[in-house]
Each structure stands twice: as structure tokens, then as C-alpha cells.
Image (tube, rainbow, N blue to C red):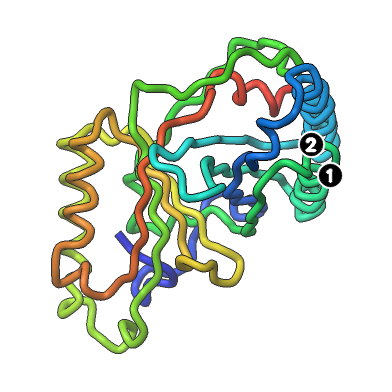
Amino acid sequence: MNQSHDPQAGDKTDDAEDVIVLYRGGRLPSWDQLDATLQLEYQQEHVDTMLAVAHEHRLRNINGYRLIAPHGAWERFWSIAFPSLAGAEAWMSAEVAPPYGRYGHYEYDLARRWRPDSLSWLPQREITSGGADPRQVPALAVDTGSIVVLCFSRWQRGSDEVTPVVRGDERRRQRLQDVARDQGLIHGEVFHLVGSGRDGDLAWVLEFPDLSGAEAWIDAEVEPPGGSYHERTYHLARRWAPDYFVTWPEA
């Protein structure tokens, strides 16, 4: 596993032209003070607006995750892919627009998908859609059938001056592949931030069938010597209403 610009990994990526919006969000307490009828009105207006942006700018995919333990106003994490920067900009502008936007917490980073050869073994979940109308919002809930590790990471300063053998790069990579195989890793993807975010340069999304897989992955990552050369922040999450949001790119 390679964090940030791994000196040995190079910069080959999949879907390199896509612009990814990474969004940490949640609703503010003021939302709960609104009348339920007004909440539904604002929500529907917001959904219609965002679907119009998705259609105009050819939304590629959108994936949401709800943190198991929210951090203040941050309760959900999203990856939202567009084929161009214009789509990402339009999405962020529409999302914060009032009236709905007054009641949300918004933190954005722009990123690209990042998959060097050393991570080509990460599995990809197959995406299927039932073709429902996304304008009809169902009761939204988490998918309790899996657990997701969200990891934000960067190299420790000076790590590029240490040889890969001393850093234990290959041993770390093999440990993680073993965990992925033994624990049934369902899906893994990595995003390289444009610039550096508050918690690092890379954002990892790793989906396992259960908590034991998530724990095993984190243990394998932090094990020395490889774990000593990175800074990491971890959050556990569930997929958020995946059957609903998979219909958005088709709208």
C-alpha cells in the first residue's frame, strides 16, 4: 500500500480525467427546528436542483457513507465524480445554495482517482441499478451489510530519503494483500487530492464484510516498519442509501 506520492509507485491512474468532489457534510441543528412540511419542500427542491446539475454535467457516479461516530457537524462522506472541473464547480455551488444550503455543513476537496500498479489488486464493487426514479426520495438508511474504512493519509516528512527496503514497502504491501484476501475485501479505491487536505494527500475507501476485516486492515497498515513512515486518520462508516444514489447518474 502506498501513501501520497510513493517514490516507487509512479503516477499511473484509472479514469485520470475524472474530477472527484470529496465532501464531508452533515445537517446543522437548525434543520431539526424547521417544520416537517418545510423540510420536505426544501429537500425536494434540493434534489431536483442537484439532479439537474448531474444531468447537465454528466455525473459519473456518487457514493455516500455515513460515519458510525459523527465528528461534530460532519456525519457523511461523499465521493462525486464528473468528467470535468465545470461539473464539480456546478455541483458545489448548487449544493450550498439556499434555502437547503443554509442548514448544511460543507467541506470540499477536489481529487483524482489514484491507482498505481502496486494497487491494481484492489477489488471493485459491481454497480447495478434497479432503474428507480431518483426524484422520488425513499426513506434513506445505511447498508448494514458491510463496513467501510475511510482513511486519510500522508507520508511523514523525509520518508522519500529512506530506501524502500528500510521502509518495509514490499512487506507492507504483502500484508495488506493477505488481509484483503483473508478478510474478503469487497471494494477498494484511492483518491489523490488536488493539493493537500487537512488530514493528508490521499483518501482511501475500503469496504469489508464486517468489523474484523476493518480491524485487520488497520492493524496491518500501522505495523512497523511501514506504519512508522505515514500519518493516518481513520473513520469507520456504512454505505449510505446505495440503492438510491446509484440511480442518480442515470437521471
| Crowd tier of the residue under label 1, counting other residues whose Cα lies within 10 Å: few below 14, some 14–19, many 20 or above | few
Along the horizontal axis of the image, is 209 left or right of 243? left
How far from the left and from the top, in percent, is residue 83? Answer: 72, 47
Dividing the picture into quarters, in which one does residue 132 lie? top right
Give the quadrant of residue 48.
top right
Numbered disc 2: secondary structure: helix
- Which x, y percent locates residue 191? 50, 55
Determine if residue 214 is in view. yes
Amino acid type, mark 2: Tyr
Q: Is residue 123 above or below residue 175?
A: above
Q: Nearer the viewer, residue 160 or 214?
A: 214
The quadrant the C terminus occupies is: top right
Quick check: can you spot residue 18?
no
Name the quadrant containing residue 166. bottom left
Q: Dots 2 and 1: beta carbons under 8 Å?
A: yes
| Residue ID at (46%, 66%) | 199
- Dot 1 amino acid type: Ala
Q: Quadrant of the N terminus?
A: bottom left
Where residue 153 appears, as percent x and y from the top left, is 39, 64
**SS for tag 1?**
loop
**Residue 100 — which label?**
2
Callout count: 2
Q: Is residue 175 left or right of residue 143?
A: left
Vertical relation: 87 (above or below) 117: above
Q: Identify the residue shown where x is 49% and y is 36%.
A: 65
Relative to residue 220, is residue 114 drawn left or right? Answer: right
Picture coordinates of residue 89, whole percent (x, y) = 79, 53
Residue under circle 1? 97
Instruction: Report the Cα–Cα distance between label 2 and label 1.
Output: 7 Å
Relative depth, front residue between 165 and 62: 62
Q: Residue at x 42, y 45 (%)?
A: 205
Residue shown at 57%/42% (left/top)? 78
